[in-house]
Image (spheres, rainbow, N blue to C red):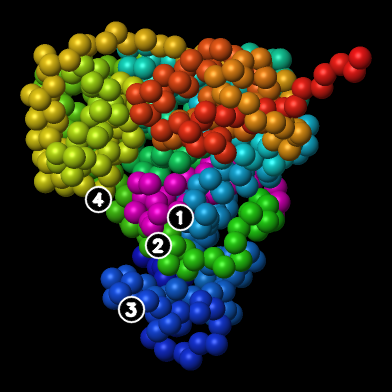
Amino acid sequence: MDHSRTPLFDALRRHAEQNPVQFHIPGHKKGAGMDPEFRSFIGQNVLDIDLINIAPLDDLHQPVGVILEAQKLAADAFGADATFFSVQGTSSAIMAMILSVCGNGDKIIVPRNVHKSILSAIIFAGARPVFLSPVRDRNLGIDHGVTTRSVRRALERHPDAAAVLVINPTYFGVCANLKEIVDLVHEYDVPVLVDEAHGALIHFSDELPLSAMQAGADMAATSVHKLGGSMTQSSVLNVRAGRVNIQRVQTILSLLTTTSTSYPLLASLDTARRQLALHGRELAARTVALAQQARQAVNEIPGLYSFGEDLLGDEATFDYDPTKLTIHVRHLGITGYDAENWLREHHNIEVELSDMYNILCLVTPGDDASSIDLLLSALRQLSETHRHTGEVRELVVTIPEIPHLSLTPRDAFYGETEVVPFRESAGRIIAEFIYVYPPGIPILLPGEVISQENIDYIVDHLEVGLPVKGPEDRTVENVKVIVEETAIS
């Protein structure tokens, strides 16, 4: 295929050049009906292509023209049999992926450290999750992937599972042996779904881990906007034919997707695919080189540590993406949350996430030597400021056991509920999510029995200022639980 082509982007530009008189939405009509200050700031070009699914521009819900061409080019670039564009982020693509293969009562094998969109899809499907425990790194205080061994045990107990979902790579860039897991799951004739939100570049470089499509997975939701150069909220769903019905995937996506699809987002996917297909290898090589230089320099700063190949060697740490720069700050006597705030306040630097012990910095094709130098200079000052000033805490891994699932997530989410004080809720069945975002991994999900361990863990996070989210009560003082029936005397 000719990857220099951008059929959708070209069609939008041609349409804008013709300057038609518009009697359709959006009502701002090329910005004329918009607040002038915003119009001036955002720029005329993007407003000219902020259009709707009129005939010359095709329709994402049933593409037959330029969108179909753009998606076929994307499928070729990502090594898929079909690729679908998402203008509602990877969350929507993940939901479509799961709803395409799971129905009411179906089992789906998933790691516990999954994004909340996966559990949202499980609620919508009425599916029953079978959780795998990710491997916890007791030196860094983070979760890695799942092992082939744990997937095998899950399949032996649940050979009737409708799907197995894995994360590749994790938020921190670590990968299990995806090819081995895919081959194992396919022995049971079960489809493999991959949350590839943080792997947009990996398909285009031999220096990076295997992509889902390269490993033979059946579906993968990939955040092109995170690392691949498209606009925020634009992603793709890559599909391999065989165990998955491609037409069913299109139907489910259409059910979930707005009918007012954003053409600037779609065009950014079309052009990002072009850049990745034509220049992805060199972009990835330069990005990896920058990240490795940064990693080496970080490891020379007293009190800081960034893992690299030294982490590899176990089932859950088979490979890693070096462009994810995880920086362990515990030896400075501060939390990752402290480091994030300090970098913001003193150097105007924003990191991807922080947790109790780490910060995560993403190195992308948008970086160069100057941005890396700014980060390193700030980290050196962070070290100088905090070394020997605070007590270095021991790394304590207090992740509670995975709670007992008493009801299916859907039954709990839609069940009869009452509100109780969270600190007094031990033993009750929760009816909402509680998670730390980023990265959005649930600590409790609807249907699970709250333990005192869960309560203590969440309170610890709240007390150090980490972003605990999910409950309707944003203070997490109260929580919704299933109403308990009392005996009638």
Q: In terms of depth relative to the viewer, which is nearer, 399 or 391?
A: 391
| Picture quadrant of residue 183 | top right
Question: Within 10 angstroms of label 4, few (less than 14), some, or many (20 or more) residues?
Answer: few
Q: Residue at x 56, y 12 (%)?
A: 452
Tag 3's secondary structure? helix
Circle 3 is placed at which residue position?
A: 36
Mark with earlier residue (4, 1): 1
Tag 4's secondary structure? loop
Image x and y of residue 349, in percent: 20, 42
Asked if 72 appears above or below 402 in the picture, the reply is below
Q: Outermost residue, bottom direction? A: 21
Circle 4 is placed at which residue position?
A: 366
Circles 2 and 1, Cβ within 8 Å, touching? The answer is: yes
Q: Amino acid at mark 2?
A: Ser
Circle 1 is placed at which residue position?
A: 234
Circles 3 and 2, Cβ within 8 Å, touching? The answer is: no
Mark with earlier residue (4, 2): 2
Circle 2 is placed at which residue position?
A: 268
Q: Amino acid at mark 3?
A: Pro
Image x and y of residue 477, in percent: 52, 28
Tag 1's secondary structure? loop
Mark 3 to mark 2: distance in Å?
Answer: 25 Å
Q: Confirm whether the magenta stretch covers residue 222.
A: yes
Question: Within 10 angstroms of label 1, few (less than 14), some, or many (20 or more) residues?
Answer: many
Asked if 246 appears above or below 166 in the picture, the reply is below
Q: Residue at x 41, y 39 (%)?
A: 198
- Tell me if residue 107 can be seen: no
Image x and y of residue 142, in percent: 39, 20
